[in-house]
Amino acid sequence: MLKKRLVFALLWKNGKFCLSRNFKLQQAGDLMWIEKNYNFKVIAFSIDELVVLNVSRGDKEMTTFAAQVTELTRGCFVPLAAGGGIRSIDDAMLLLRSGADKLVVNTSLSRDPSLVSALAQRFGRQCVVASIDYRNVNGRREVFVENGAVATGMTVEEAVANAERLGAGEIYLTSMDRDGTGQGYDSEMLDAVAPTARVPVIASGGVGKFEHLAGWLSRPYASAAATANIFNFLGEGLREARTHIEDQGIPLAKWEFQWKG
Amino acid sequence: MIAIVDYGLGNVRSVMGALEFLGVSAKVTTSPDDLFAATKLILPGVGSFRAAIENIDRRNLREPIVSCVRGQNKPILGICLGMQLLAEVGEEDGPSAGLGLIPGEVKHFPEFAPPIRVPHIGFNSVSFVCSQPLFEGLGDRADFYFVHSYRMVCTDAADVSSWCEYGDRFTASVQRGHVYGTQFHPEKSQTSGLRLLKNFVELEVPC
């Protein structure tokens, strides 16, 4: 039986990894710092998938980002999705050659939709993840691009339909209001959108504890749960989360957590 | 020295990364000389069967690969599309002739009722047919990462070394003598995959 997925997201901004709250970034450190302070090696062996997002504002420094992706693949033996800043086929090829298995597109979904179609055509739908960020604007959940700075006027439902039509293989849906708050996912939105989505939906934004992950994954239409909350899952945190999720009867892949050689 | 065959359509870097992590001496190569000098071959692959076999033929790698395996008895491990290429025929954009090292053909998944979607993507359980060196240390079943729309249908059931269930049962891995293949990606399957790769690397080379 196909298992559900626990996805970890790393946010990279001009050379440093960041913590985020409502899309306001706080610089943490480089990969060595992350490894040392958050024991990233343990995290890497506790997840089903890694997402690395280039959240640099202004100059995206794609070459430096790509080198970082390569560095991450050295200790990551699960699929890795990379993106943020993909504005051309060349950007995409750079990331794939650098070790990414999947591409993440966000702003291009509205600014350059033909690029997204071209990526899906060339690399396959399963290689293209549509990242959609949204927040509440006067009671309506609206989609924003450019790291959450620019309004598109689109509703989440419109953006999801658009992404599917363009050929995205998955939707990575992030609530900007919940991001970094630790208060749990925006279940209302997820329950409204995921059941009718034609591709898997990965929930993102708000995870603070095991229960948030299990609560979402227990829904039959939930494929994957993502968190960028490195702080709340220090050390064995994600391993324990997996056990907790499995105890709820939710199918997750199993493997030996420690490589003993 | 393990030779990872680079024919332009594979995630050679991921496979190389896994072998480096294991401390194994390996080389990504397009050169037949390197294949002949290697102790074992790994054939990775992501993409279309037709494009892959055309690339292999354009680079004149078909003969060297088959010769290494049949003539020199070098063990080979095909991964994902690489496993499919071991078959006789692939129907994707096809039909096209595979390497013919495992009798059988590669066919698209049938149409399933929702919510079962194709491509088959994600971790899924693999049941080993019997205990064998490639699966040493993994028990009788383990979870591996899959991403594919086509699967191999073997002519000889004895060549199927493990099964996976998705819609119906399909071939998750093959073994025929020293020819091995996994439909799943061991380099993307955490410690279970690393264990399998290590087992392949440590296989005793037949004389």
Image: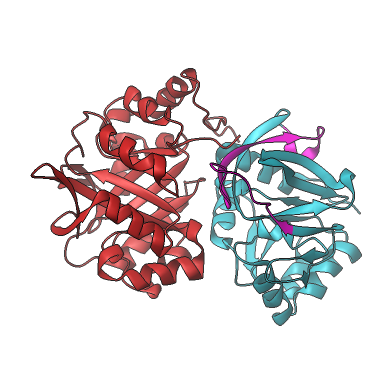
Chain colours: A red, B cyan
Residue at 43 percent across and 20 percent down: it is A244
Residue at 50 percent across and 21 percent down: it is A249
Q: Is residue B102 above or below residue B173?
A: below
Query: Magenta stretch containing residue B123, yes or no?
Result: yes
Please indicate, yes or no, whether residue A185 appears anywhere in the rendered image.
Answer: no
Q: Is residue A79 above or below residue A208?
A: below
Count all numbered tags in the image, as a single digit.
0
Residue at 59 percent across and 55 percent down: it is B15
In the picture, which quadrant includes the N terminus of chain B?
bottom right
Q: Position of residue B16 (x, y in %)?
A: 58, 57
Please indicate, yes or no, whether residue B125 appears anywhere in the rendered image.
Answer: yes
Magenta-highlighted residues: B107-136
Q: Is residue B88 above or below residue B77?
A: below
Quarter residue B68 falls in: bottom right
Query: Is residue A33 rendered to the left or right of residue A3?
Result: left
Quarter residue A38 falls in: top left
Query: Magenta stretch containing residue A206, yes or no?
Result: no
Compare residues B153 and A158 and report the one nearer the observer: A158
Residue at 76 percent across and 54 percent down: it is B152
In the picture, which quadrant includes the C terminus of chain B?
bottom right
Quarter residue A204 falls in: top left
Compare residues A173 and B76 and report the one nearer the observer: A173
Q: Position of residue B60 (x, y in %)?
A: 75, 80
Query: Is residue A254 rendered to the left or right of residue A17?
Result: right
Q: Position of residue A194 (x, y in %)?
A: 37, 41
Compare residues B24 and B145 and report the one nearer the observer: B145
Query: Is residue B41 rendered to the left or right of residue A203?
Result: right
Q: Position of residue A70 (x, y in %)?
A: 43, 58
| Residue found farthest to the top | A247
Query: Is residue A74 rendered to the left or right of residue A233?
Result: right
